[in-house]
Image (cartoon, grey):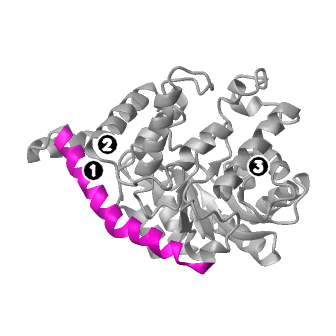
Amino acid sequence: MHHNQHEADKRSGLTRREFMRDGAAGAAALAAGLGAATRASAQDNEAVKKTRGYNPDMEYRRLGKTDVWVSSLCLGGHWKRIDQMVPGILKGKGWLSADIADAGFQKNRDEVVSRCIEHGINYIDACTYPEIQAYSRALKGRRDKMYMGFSWYEHEARQADRRTAGRLIETLDEGIKVCGLDHVDFWRITCRSDGSTDENGNHIMAHTMAESEEIAKALGMAKRSGKAVHTGVSSHDRLWLAMMMEKFPGQIEAVVTPYTAKSKVLPKDGMFDAAVKHDAGMFGIKPFASNSLFKGDSSPDSPEAEEDDRLARLAIRYILCNPALTAPIPGLINAHQVDNVAQAAPERRELDLAEAEELEDAMAVAWANLPADYQWLKDWEYV
């Protein structure tokens, strides 16, 4: 908890358990008044039934102004811990060192995608060069079942020489060619992660206005040419995302941004207000805090597997209480994990007090266990 929030709670006489109790009650009321109504209206919407991979047991949410209906639980492109399923597949230290040409690797990705389709999960978010290749292969012959978010972040706006419309379109063209596609469903350019502050504590946006205009220009070009049906951006800078949604509503149809099981329910700041005002969809990455939520190692025979399954479902249910968020996008490494998180869609959405306390305690441990390169997730507790 941030220091200011802690001090405010002390002044008001709130204990931690009282704060959580009231938050759980508020979430339940909001979910009953907003989430339940949204689910009911979606159930009766004929457009929902025409979406890709429709399954009546899955909840679908409208992806902002795109009018595309996506499953309330989607598939993140990352395959962290995949070596638990395909031993020896990681050729280096990181998960991106996986040999994507390996038959065992592709078989694993195909199986996960197939199980997603069985459950009505109809969106994959791929944001690295290996991911766009692996998932393009996995969807070959069945693109009518799933939408795919597409980003080659290594050659996009995080790189200083890729912040012009021309260079960004070059990346899209090359990515489409490499993956054997003729267009992409949703090009969401991966932009600089964070802003900064000047010597007076003022926020400096992740991108200058000139760079932002070039990013929006590239997205507009891609839509007009038919290379991308829908467009958006990814960043961790909330103020920059809010500005982009406001200044370029035609190009920023959806955004991809962090949202963990510790982010507070129904946050009210510029980013979420902007998403509602400008009708932009939102996908949430890192719902499990980069696996720091879990006690086990994600292997099928882990002694902590059952408890970790329960924590995963609690996290998804908690996140889905925010109707401003279209869907969390967890990375999943086997069909069982898909089965498990898919259960969260039809389950009772609101957490009761005991569940809220259990998840809060688990996320406190997760926060303490965050690796050094994921400490930035702590900035997403109060958003």
Q: Give the x, y percent position of residue 194.
A: 52, 48
Circles 1 and 2 in contact, beta carbons < 8 Å: yes
Q: CA distance from mark 3 to mark 1?
A: 42 Å
Q: Give the x, y percent position of residue 2.
A: 29, 40
Bin the neighbour count of mark 2 within 10 Å (Cα to Cα): few under 14, some 14-19, many 20 and up.
many
Q: How many marks?
A: 3
- Mark 3 against mark 2, which lies toward the viewer? 2
| Vertical position of residue 182 compared to residue 343: above or below | below
> Residue 210's image quarter?
bottom right
> Residue 167's image quarter?
bottom right
Q: Which mark is residue 155?
A: 3
The residue that mark 1 highlights is 24
Q: Which mark is residue 356?
A: 2
Bin the neighbour count of mark 3 within 10 Å (Cα to Cα): few under 14, some 14-19, many 20 and up.
many
The amino acid type found where label 3 is placed reads His
Range of residues picked out in magenta: 17-46
Mark nearer the N terminus (3 vs 1): 1
| Vertical position of residue 41 compared to residue 303: above or below | below
The answer to whether residue 13 is seen in the rendering is yes
Q: Nearer the viewer, residue 383 or 109?
A: 109
